[in-house]
Amino acid sequence: MPAIIGILLTVGLYMLVAGSHNIETFEAPLTNDSRSILDREPIQPIESPHGLDEAKVSLGKSLFYDPRLSTDNSVSCASCHVLESGGSDGLSHSTGALGRKTTYNSLTVLNAALNSKLTWLGKYGSLYQQTEELIVNKNTLGSNWKQLEEKLSADQLLNEQFIATYKSGVSKTNIVDALVQYEKSLCLSNSRFDEFLKGKTNAISKEELEGYKLFKLYGCASCHQGVNVGGNMFMKFGIFDDYFKNDAPANLGRFQLTKNEADRYVFRVPSLRNAELTAPYFHDGSASSLDDAVAVMAKYQLGRELPAADQRKIVAFLKTLTGVPKHEK
């Protein structure tokens, strides 16, 4: 609870600063040295993954696309995490094994290794924990480990690949590790905004830079910051207005885990990287476009309606956060 109070104070401070800049009609002044207005950045650039075992990454990629990981051989990890579509699937709720629907909107797998907590509720502290759980979760892949190990071991070529990569061959530990190594490789350092932060000042346009200044001045960066532009803190959804009209179980946020009243309607702040590609938005998939999502955030988290020009510029900035997997270029 103290952390949330501190965050709210930070949001209030950003709003106060924004007011002092008359943000309703703000136009970002640009100089020849546009870097000069970007001191003490709340967002840091992604560094390319290094130190990964390429054999494990290759095996993990094969498993990521393998529907045999699901109990009925119907879906794979890639079914809900489509790399070409920003690492999600464009659905409000994904379809898992046996046709079951997920409880929440699927988050992107791209840059997931950069998050300090995983899932909308922050249930897992590592990719290992999350991957192990999703393979057996009835709403996702729905497998059990004994049957999965037997299924994969029966594939001679796959079994040989496991033995060549892990001396102990096909096992729960090795399946999870290979998948995690592949997920770690999906940290994308090639967005235009990363290039800008690293010194290429012409990587983004004047309008996009103005959008970034507005993003900071309105207070968006008080929650969406760090290397993943989010993914490292929790926040109540609906600070200035009641977003939740029905207390359906899926809408109770972290309260579902902790049973702590202070966690009611509190969710992990999602990363905004690749947001251009990952509609629909929010835990319930209720916002169909990036424009809609920004408007909802302004209303419920900042308590204001953005001028159309400002909203357009913020959306333009968000699109600079899109990265592309190397093998998809």
Image: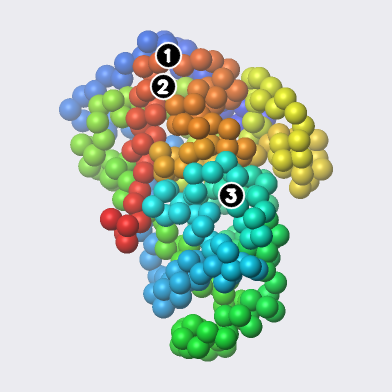
Tag 2 residue: 311
Q: Amino acid at mark 1?
A: Pro
Q: CA distance from mark 3 to mark 2?
A: 29 Å
Q: Residue at the left extreme?
A: 32
Secondary structure category for the residue under label 3: loop
Q: Which mark is residue 94?
A: 3
Please state which of residues 91 and 301 is positioned toward the viewer in this rendering.
91
| Residue sitting at x 65%, y 50% | 101
Decide which of tag 3 and tag 2 comes sooner along the chain. Answer: 3
Front disc: 1 or 3: 3
Secondary structure category for the residue under label 1: loop
Q: CA distance from mark 1 to mark 3?
A: 34 Å
Please state which of residues 283 and 118 is positioned toward the viewer in this rendering.
283
- 200 left or right, relative to 67: left
Contact between labelled residues 2 and 3, with CB atoms less than 8 Å apart: no
Eyeballing the image, is 63 above or below 112? below
Secondary structure category for the residue under label 2: helix
Q: Which colour style is shown? A: rainbow
Q: Is residue 194 among the parts visible in the rendering? A: no
Q: Amino acid at mark 3?
A: Ser
> In the image, residue 271 lies at what x, y percent?
50, 43
Eyeballing the image, is 304 above or below 292? above
Contact between labelled residues 1 and 2, with CB atoms less than 8 Å apart: yes
